[in-house]
Amino acid sequence: MTSEQSTHGDVVASTASTEASMSPQRVPVNVHETSEALVIVAPLPAVTAKDVTVELRPGAVRFWAQLRSAGPRDYLVHEWHYGGYEREIDLPAGFGGGVEATLSNGQLAIRVLRGDAATFTIQPSSG
């Protein structure tokens, strides 16, 4: 059977096997401050908004996405995976009053609002 003829079951089994054997990829971020929020932007290729979770805790924000799909393939070059993303960012004092997130064109944008620290877990909208 060629990779083009893989069944859904093959993809599910391959994804589970790959996810069990890999560590989440540390995602690079860009962070800037506005008058209302700390804005974090991160690349998350090949995942959808429902695959991503954003967690705000006092002093930190963390986001992660599960492995999206790992169909069995014979790669000639294999330098990155579809998911298994994770990153935690320490927050400066004065941020943590709320959190908003969107995922669009493979970029996750998180806004951590100014205010007293609170705890939230959300999924981004698909903006």
Image: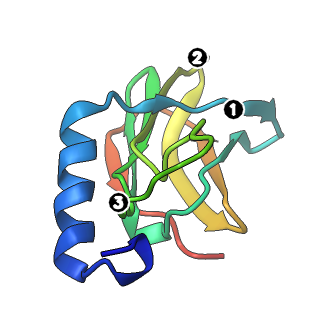
In the image shown, does 96 or 3 lie closer to the viewer? 3
Q: Which residue is mark 1?
A: 29
Specify the quadrant of the image occupied by residue 101: bottom right
Quarter of the image with the C terminus is bottom right
Rendering coords of residue 2 (x, y %): 38, 73
The residue positioned 24% from the left and 81% from the top of the image is 8
Q: Residues within 10 Å of mark 3 (few under 14, many from 20)?
A: some
Mark 3 and mark 2 in contact? Answer it, CB < 8 Å. Answer: no
Q: Is residue 84 above or below residue 117?
A: below
The residue positioned 48% from the left and 68% from the top of the image is 49
Rendering coords of residue 16 (x, y %): 18, 53
Disc on res. 73: none
| Direction from residue 83 to residue 10 in the image, left or right | left
In the image shown, does 92 or 40 lie closer to the viewer? 40
Rendering coords of residue 56 (x, y %): 40, 39
What amino acid is found at the position of numbered circle 3 in the picture?
Pro
What amino acid is found at the position of numbered circle 2 in the picture?
Ala
In the image shown, does 85 or 52 lie closer to the viewer? 85
Q: Which residue is mark 2?
A: 93
The residue positioned 74% from the left and 45% from the top of the image is 36
Q: Which residue is mark 3?
A: 72
| Earlier sequence position, callout 1 versus callout 3 | 1
